[in-house]
Amino acid sequence: MDALNQLVDGFGTALTPGNLLYAFVGVLLGTAIGVLPGIGPAMTIALLLPLTRGLDVTSALIMFAGIYYGGMYGGSTTSILLNTPGESASVVTAIEGNKMAKAGRAAQALATAAIGSFVAGTIATLLLALLAPSVADLAVQVSPADFFAIMLLAFIAVTSVLGSSRIRGLAALGLGLTIGLIGIDKTSGQQRLTFGIPEIADGIDVIVVAVGLFAVGEALWTAAHLRRKPIEVIPVGNPRMSRNDWARSWKPWLRGTVIGFPFGAIPAGGAEIPTFLSYVTEKRLSKHPEEFGHGAIEGVAGPEATNNASAAGGLVPMLTLGIPTTATAAIMLAAIQSYGIEPGPQLFDKEPELVWGLIASLFIGNTVLLVLNLPLAPVWARLLRIPRTYLYAGILFFSSLGAYAANANTFDLFLLLVIGALGFMMRRYGLPVLPCIIGVILGPFAEQKLRQALQISNGDVGGLFEPISVVVYCIVGLILLWPLVRRLLPRKAVSSVLAEATHEIEESHHHHGLTNAVSVERHASGDGRAEPDR
């Protein structure tokens, strides 16, 4: 009950006229930018991150909650209308959603996605409010050695889950850890990797890194492989669902919430696996399995609910442990850190107004999203007609403006271009971006916990092996050895669910014509070089 009382106090913070306005503006901006082709929620937040620097920290994060949900909704819109997911977690939505749109049911697909996102987001945020304080109380008792082990698990998990090539994942993580090392060592006072450049003695601003890797890198990559033919946008009518659509959607919404939230709360990175599982589950439980692959509404309702529940679940480790599980959560973590606030177990005690105001604003942003975007769906569809040449030129301009405004330092513009070029090259050679940004954010924190653990044990390496950390290291070992174990197992022993999900996605890539945004995500996850659009 204490959590519910504090949540009520959080609503008192979030429901002030000023904060309501920021939530509304966040949803509007997040949807308007997130709906544009090739721009996912992570890139949306990275692009708008510098705009919040002049705001009070609570107002800034409330605005970010709106941007967060707005960007998520925008990703489903492009998946359904253009068959162009902004992130890999939206690929499953595109399979059935675009088929529904081509069959003249674009409005119904958008409606079930929006309402499913609202239902799943509301339930998952309530679970976040109930579970996060307990997790934070337990985390306070975790030793530095255990924290280091948990962060090592997060590093290994995000490099292993994303794609088939762990080498690329580890290479991306190494790049992020290297960037995170730049600056003055807080323990010894020595400069590391600064090469005598005074402007980076304090390290590289995480905002510059996030905007460079996501916004500039993605814009350069997509602009280099623009499609020559104009985008064909499917017209959208009034997004209303029939009684039959409601009957076929409400169970997938609830099942998607149950599948998505636990996956999001585990520091293992991404909503890809749970959305695949949701799709296969709905296909097996549906009374109309013959419609799958031809526009089944369950194939949109379930994965979209799963995606949003996973996103809310991802805020549990971010707020309680300071560990992001997705690219979007990583950028939100960077936003919190930019105000000098360190997310972690003590955040709930030190900044209760901030935390509960943020959680309450998630409910508000979710509601505003539904009320605002159902009638505005045809308007967002018209935004898709913006020429991409103007779109990505605008992204580069606003990225540069935002990076400069963050610290009013012209050197940051040079760093932005360098990191943007790095992001471009990472996409070119199939290196995932998420491990890199997590390495930048968590690297210094992991180093701090490692040093604290060794100081407590007087330099004895055995001090790193405590009961909790030993269990975590065993999990790390299982993750690393799983490919070898899987090869030794009979094929039938391997989960048919994941195999079927992978088959569906591969079929989608080859037969449904997903454009550059998906190929970038897929190849950036380590599946090989990205192919340019023809």
Image: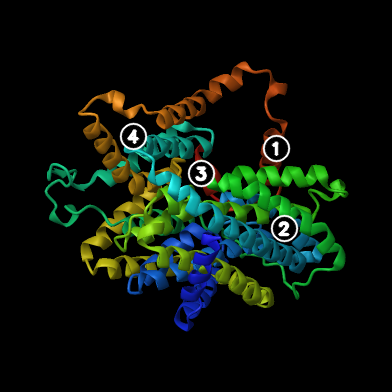
Q: Position of residue 324 (x, y in %)?
A: 44, 49
Q: Position of residue 428 (x, y in %)?
A: 44, 44
Dot 1: element: helix
Dot 2: element: helix
Q: Which badge, 2 or 4, is on the more N-terminal residue?
A: 2
Residue behind mark 3: 269
Task: Please say if the residues under marks 4 and 1 sit with CB atoms less than 8 Å apart.
Answer: no
Q: CA distance from mark 3 to mark 4?
A: 22 Å
Instruction: Tell me the number on the disc at residue 80.
Output: none
Residue behind mark 2: 98
Residue at the extreme front:
1
Q: Which badge, 3 or 4, is on the more N-terminal residue?
A: 4
> In the rendered image, which quarter contains the N terminus?
bottom right
Residues packed near mark 2 inside 10 Å, few (<14), some (14 to 19) or many (20 plus): many
Residue behind mark 4: 145
Q: Which badge, 2 or 3, is on the more N-terminal residue?
A: 2
Task: Please say if the residues under marks 2 and 3 sit with CB atoms less than 8 Å apart.
Answer: no
